[in-house]
Image (cartoon, helix red, strand yellow):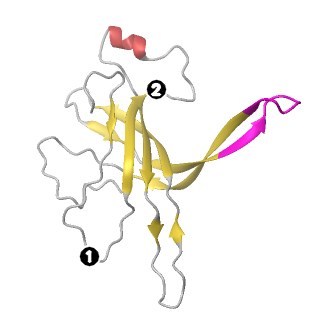
């Protein structure tokens, strides 16, 4: 977490110690997380509750950028690859009031398909509209502060 920012936010790093030799991993170049209210329904904002108690942020917004990934191939075939991706997730986020433990629910992992549309009948103005397309499922388990990372069970991707 980056101190001094409201809402809480920070960078994502990929931990890869003690890798299993026969497992291939998608390489995470960079990523960001941010606690947020519903980005699709902002209304008056939940920030006002922070004046009276700890602010409520029911969602964790996640953005992960990956490197290209070469798929395994047979000797006589040309190798296919997955182009670099930017992945997005909106994860339900709760904090237990008594214990302070964070609970993160499973979420859809999406890419964004962008379409550029004419914003006026003359075509002088254009607007980019995006649609989230599900490409997988993401499950996260918060690492306890006193817990030692083994690099396998706590790897993000």
Q: Is residue 92 above or below residue 16?
A: above
Viewer-side residue, 91 vs 74: 74
Picture quadrant of residue 52:
top left
Residue 126 pos. (x, y %): 75, 33
- Tag 1 secondary structure: loop
Q: Which residue is mark 2?
A: 37
Q: Residue furthest right?
A: 121
Q: Which residues are magenta?
A: 114-126
Query: Which of labels 2 and 1 is toward the front?
Result: 1
The answer for how far apart the CA atoms under marks 2 and 1 are is 41 Å
Q: Dot 1 surroundings within 10 Å: few (below 14), some, or many (20 or more)?
A: few
User: Is 134 drawn above or below residue 10 in the view shown?
Assistant: below
Q: In screen coordinates, is 110 left or right of 22? A: right
Residue visible at 70% across and 44% down in the picture: 115
Q: Which residue is at the far bottom? A: 76
State the quadrant of the C terminus.
Answer: bottom left
* Magenta highlight on residue 124: yes
Q: Residue at x 54, y 21 (%)?
A: 42
Note whether 110 is above or below 75 in the view shown: above
Residue with the mark numbered 1: 21
Q: How dense is the environment of label 2, judged by Cα within 10 Å: few (below 14), some, or many (20 and up)?
A: some
Under circle 2, the secondary element is loop
Residue 84 drawn at (x, y percent): 49, 57
Query: Residue 96, how many percent across, how many down?
Result: 27, 31
- Quadrant where the N terminus sits is top left
118 or 143, nearer to the observer: 118
Which residue sits furthest top?
51
Q: Is residue 141 left or right of residue 27?
A: left
Q: Residue at x 64, y 43 (%)?
A: 131
- Residue 74 in percent (x, y) is at 48, 88
**Is 57 inside the magenta-drawn segment?**
no
């Amino acid at each position: 977490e980056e101190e001094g920012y409201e809402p809480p936010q920070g960078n994502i790093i990929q931990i890869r110690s003690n890798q299993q030799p026969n497992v291939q991993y998608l390489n995470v170049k960079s990523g960001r997380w941010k606690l947020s209210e519903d980005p699709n329904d902002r209304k008056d904002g939940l920030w006002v509750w922070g004046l009276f108690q700890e602010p409520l942020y029911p969602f964790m917004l996640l953005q992960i950028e990956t490197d290209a990934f070469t798929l395994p191939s047979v000797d006589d075939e040309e190798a296919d690859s997955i182009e670099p991706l930017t992945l997005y997730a909106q994860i339900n986020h709760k904090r237990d009031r008594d214990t302070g433990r964070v609970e993160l629910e499973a979420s859809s992992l999406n890419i964004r398909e962008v379409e550029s549309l004419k914003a006026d009948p003359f075509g002088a103005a254009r607007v980019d509209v995006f649609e989230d397309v599900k490409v997988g499922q993401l499950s996260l388990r918060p690492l306890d502060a006193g817990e030692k990372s083994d690099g396998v069970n706590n790897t993000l991707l």
